[in-house]
């Protein structure tokens, strides 16, 4: 399973037929039906909770210092989806967020920019306009985020809206109710339908991140099955959480998902990305995740195209650590800008 | 790994003072030895760390006499509640000085600082905490009315977990009211000598703990001393057998914790990622220099190829090198002699037809090193499937049915530990009922806790250490007096 192919397929480069063919090949059935999906997902190896947590704890003891820390901090910044998802979001707040992403460290042009800003659907237009020419992607949380409790028609319309407004990336939520009640086909076909809209974007496919909301799936066995289900349906990224449910992105959950994308690559040649989101606030935590990426999935995932952090407050902590490395002294919260 | 290189993150060795020479710790004081001296080296660099006195028979005699006096006059008559205070104090001091002990252990033994910091030293402290709690409850421990200590205990410990094995030996012995004469291994005496300083710091009455350093002859003198009432030994089966012969016909009681050749049994329905971690932890923890190491993986044949693939790619991420680096997973082999034994058996494995694979890691120029190695196509007839290698070398065998797995697990002179990996609870119970091993781990491996008894079947020894069981060998049962 680990004989990694040298050339990998980027998931968003596949058309719907290719996605279906890859899925059919894996589950061994030309027709993607409820029974075949269930059989496949329940044939995946189990996850021992104690062992998974133990592995995370051990990876967490890696000591990343000096040059490797400097490298890691810049990599973390370049992987951040700088996020604001509040009912109180306004155009002004979103413009300010984008400005922060454009210039994370005023006076240091060498500081990398975050990969994307992540906003609610109705703020996409504002964000797109503000981000123009910066290379910063605009990600929209769509499909009746965060609960997803709306009809498929509404969820698809929501997505189409965001895509039309110019979103580069769509963060959708799966129907956790359907997953927990065993209706895997519903979850699968929802993702397929959302993906179709993403793929049809005029300026090229919008990347689709599929949020599993692991805090509601609870068990690692569920997380593993949901990861595979999302990848079978054509997810470009699998994402832990909305950030609205606790626990959000934990290290063990992320490791289980990293194992899933690693094994999916070995099985299909397709490299799916991973995005932990919610609860990662410090550089120290973020670096633990990078270590896990490096040692569990492999260095090819150390790339903003394949690993992201969904976070709002992480950026400033990383910037403070970055300043400390450069100057040798801790500054303080007034030495980084607020967005 | 090229993109994300981990810069060196060495633990500071300045936290511990190593003297240029050490004497013997007898009757609460460091004294000269009469048997000359030996050098202890850092196996990762071959640099000499210190000179350590060698105890001859006259020194051992002094130590035993001091232990006898202390046992009769102070420690034996002392109420359990008072003994407990000393043991708690030792436990706390070990925890407080943990960094010092971890650094010293790593320097003298070669094990990664991550392990000495996260496993050896915390467990050593936990052992004293645990047995401190028993000291005033001996009447209620199930060993009859008013059980009594043996008196003076002679203890000889190995080099693989120097401080932890010291704790396994000293904590229950002292809790039960015995006094001890302990001989650490010749290649790893330093943490025991630092422990002697800690004993002084704790104000333990003189003679309760005596540490005599030296090699095999010193150990034999401790075991053979006429005034030693009980002996406890952890080490090789060969030495264990000679001790059993040496004390045959005497009044001495013995606890022997000897070799192993554990089967780590992986069923096709195992939680595969955690099983791979368990295999790694089973055989590469402490460079495989663990008596209960999972040195034989028995994998269900249908799962063999996938498991080996996953294992190999996992081993590719293990970091071998400077044991003082906090990111090191695989440290140095403890001695040139041990390295030679690992080389000899590995070569035999290849010569006998097993297929050898080693992780591709750079081997440092100085010191004693062996890369993580996996042998496939191993049969039960091969030496690498039968003999204890005591190194980072895994032998992989296959089985078809649970009964065959049990039969193959038992097909060794040892019976110290075993592992079972399956998501099926009923199969865990079925297997555990049948496996004749002192410890059976299910979906984990190499986990230790002071409350849990540990020990062997067959040639892995007799007697138990840890838990209430570990108290028994240090007591004469009330009903049998």
Image (spheres, coloured by chain):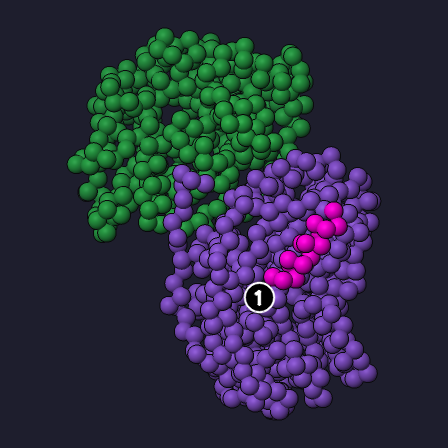
Chain colours: A green, B purple
Q: Position of residue A125 (x, y in %)?
A: 28, 15
Residue placed under numbered mark 1 in the picture: B335
Element type at marker 1?
Answer: loop
Q: Residue at image x 54%, y 45%? A: B360
B146, above or below A16, in the image: below
Q: Is residue A136 left or right of residue A248?
A: left
SS assignment for the magenta stretch, majority: helix
Region of the chain picked out in magenta, as a range: B339-353
Q: Residue at image x 40%, y 31%? A: A303
Q: Residue at image x 26%, y 29%? A: A101
Q: Position of residue A207 (x, y in %)?
A: 41, 19
A171, above or below B21, in the image: above
A145, above or below B287, in the image: above
Q: Quadrant of residue A318?
A: top left
Q: Is residue A149 magenta?
A: no
Can residue B2 be seen here? The reply is yes
């Amino acid at each position: 399973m680990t004989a990694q192919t040298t050339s990998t397929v980027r998931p968003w480069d596949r058309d719907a037929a290719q996605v279906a063919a890859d899925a059919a090949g894996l589950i061994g059935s030309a027709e993607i039906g409820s029974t075949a999906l269930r059989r496949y997902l329940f044939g995946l190896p189990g996850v021992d909770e104690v062992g998974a947590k133990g592995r995370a704890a051990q990876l967490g003891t890696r000591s990343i210092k000096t040059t490797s820390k400097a490298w890691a901090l810049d990599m973390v910044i370049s992987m951040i989806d700088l996020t604001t998802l509040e009912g109180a979001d306004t155009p002004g707040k979103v413009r300010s967020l984008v400005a922060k992403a454009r210039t994370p460290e005023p006076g240091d042009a060498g500081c990398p920019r975050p990969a994307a800003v992540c906003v609610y659907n109705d703020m996409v237009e504002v964000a797109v306009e503000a981000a123009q020419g910066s290379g910063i992607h605009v990600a929209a949380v769509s499909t009746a985020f965060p609960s997803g409790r709306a009809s498929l028609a509404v969820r698809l319309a929501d997505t189409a809206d965001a895509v039309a407004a110019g979103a580069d990336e769509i963060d959708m939520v799966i129907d956790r109710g359907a997953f927990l009640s065993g209706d895997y086909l519903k979850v699968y076909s929802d993702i397929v339908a959302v993906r179709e809209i993403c793929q049809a974007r005029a300026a090229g496919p919008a990347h689709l991140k599929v949020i599993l909301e692991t805090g509601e799936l609870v068990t690692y066995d569920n997380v593993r099955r949901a990861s595979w289900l999302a990848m079978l349906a054509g997810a470009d990224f699998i994402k832990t959480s909305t950030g609205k449910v606790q626990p959000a992105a934990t290290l063990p959950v992320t490791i289980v998902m990293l194992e899933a994308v690693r094994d999916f690559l070995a099985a299909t040649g397709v490299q799916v990305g991973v995005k932990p989101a919610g609860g990662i606030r410090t550089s120290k935590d973020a670096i633990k995740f990078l270590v896990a990426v490096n040692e569990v999935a492999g260095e090819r995932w150390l790339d903003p195209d394949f690993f992201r952090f969904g976070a709002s407050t992480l950026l400033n902590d990383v910037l403070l650590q970055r300043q400390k490395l450069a100057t040798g002294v801790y500054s303080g919260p007034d030495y980084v800008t607020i967005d | 790994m090229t993109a994300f290189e981990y810069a060196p993150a060495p633990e500071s060795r300045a936290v511990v003072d190593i003297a240029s020479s050490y004497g013997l710790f007898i009757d609460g004081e460091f004294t000269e030895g009469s048997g000359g001296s030996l050098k202890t080296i850092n196996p990762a660099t071959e640099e000499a760390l210190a000179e350590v006195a060698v105890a001859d028979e006259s020194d051992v005699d002094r130590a035993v006499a001091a232990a006898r006096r202390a046992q009769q006059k102070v420690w034996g008559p002392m109420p359990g509640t008072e003994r407990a205070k000393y043991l708690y104090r030792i436990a706390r001091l070990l925890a407080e000085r943990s960094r010092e002990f971890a650094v010293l252990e790593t320097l003298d033994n070669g094990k990664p600082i991550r392990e000495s910091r996260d496993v050896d030293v915390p467990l050593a402290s936990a052992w004293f905490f645990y047995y401190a709690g028993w000291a005033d409850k001996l009447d209620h421990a199930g060993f009859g009315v008013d059980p009594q200590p043996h008196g003076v205990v002679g203890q000889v410990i190995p080099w693989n977990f120097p401080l932890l094995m010291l704790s396994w030996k000293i904590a229950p012995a002292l809790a039960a009211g015995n006094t001890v004469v302990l001989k650490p291994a010749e290649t790893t005496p330093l943490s025991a000598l630092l422990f002697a300083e800690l004993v002084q710091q704790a104000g333990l009455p003189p003679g309760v703990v005596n540490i005599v350093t030296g090699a095999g002859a010193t150990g034999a003198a401790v075991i053979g001393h006429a005034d030693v009432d009980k002996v406890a030994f952890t080490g090789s089966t060969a030495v264990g057998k000679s001790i059993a012969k040496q004390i045959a016909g005497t009044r001495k009681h013995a606890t022997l914790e000897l070799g192993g050749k554990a089967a780590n049994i992986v069923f096709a329905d195992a939680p595969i990622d955690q099983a791979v971690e368990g295999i790694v932890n089973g055989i590469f923890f402490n460079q495989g220099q663990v008596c209960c190491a999972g040195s034989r993986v028995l994998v269900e044949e249908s799962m063999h190829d996938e498991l080996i693939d996953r294992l190999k790619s996992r081993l590719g991420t293990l970091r071998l090198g400077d044991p003082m680096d906090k990111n090191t997973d695989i440290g140095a082999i403890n001695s040139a002699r041990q390295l030679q034994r690992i080389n000899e058996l590995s070569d035999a494995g290849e010569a006998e037809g097993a297929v050898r694979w080693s992780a591709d890691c750079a081997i440092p120029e100085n010191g004693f090193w062996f890369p993580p190695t996996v042998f496939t196509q191993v049969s039960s007839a091969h030496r690498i499937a039968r003999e204890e290698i005591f190194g980072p070398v895994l032998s992989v065998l296959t089985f078809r049915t649970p009964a065959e797995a049990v039969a193959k697990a038992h097909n060794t002179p040892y019976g110290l530990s075993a592992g079972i990996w399956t998501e099926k609870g009923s199969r865990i119970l079925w297997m555990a009922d049948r496996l004749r091993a002192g410890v059976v781990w299910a979906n984990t491996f190499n986990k230790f806790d002071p409350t849990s008894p540990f020990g062997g079947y067959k040639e892995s020894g007799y007697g138990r250490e840890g838990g209430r069981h570990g108290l028994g060998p240090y007591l004469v049962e009330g009903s049998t007096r």
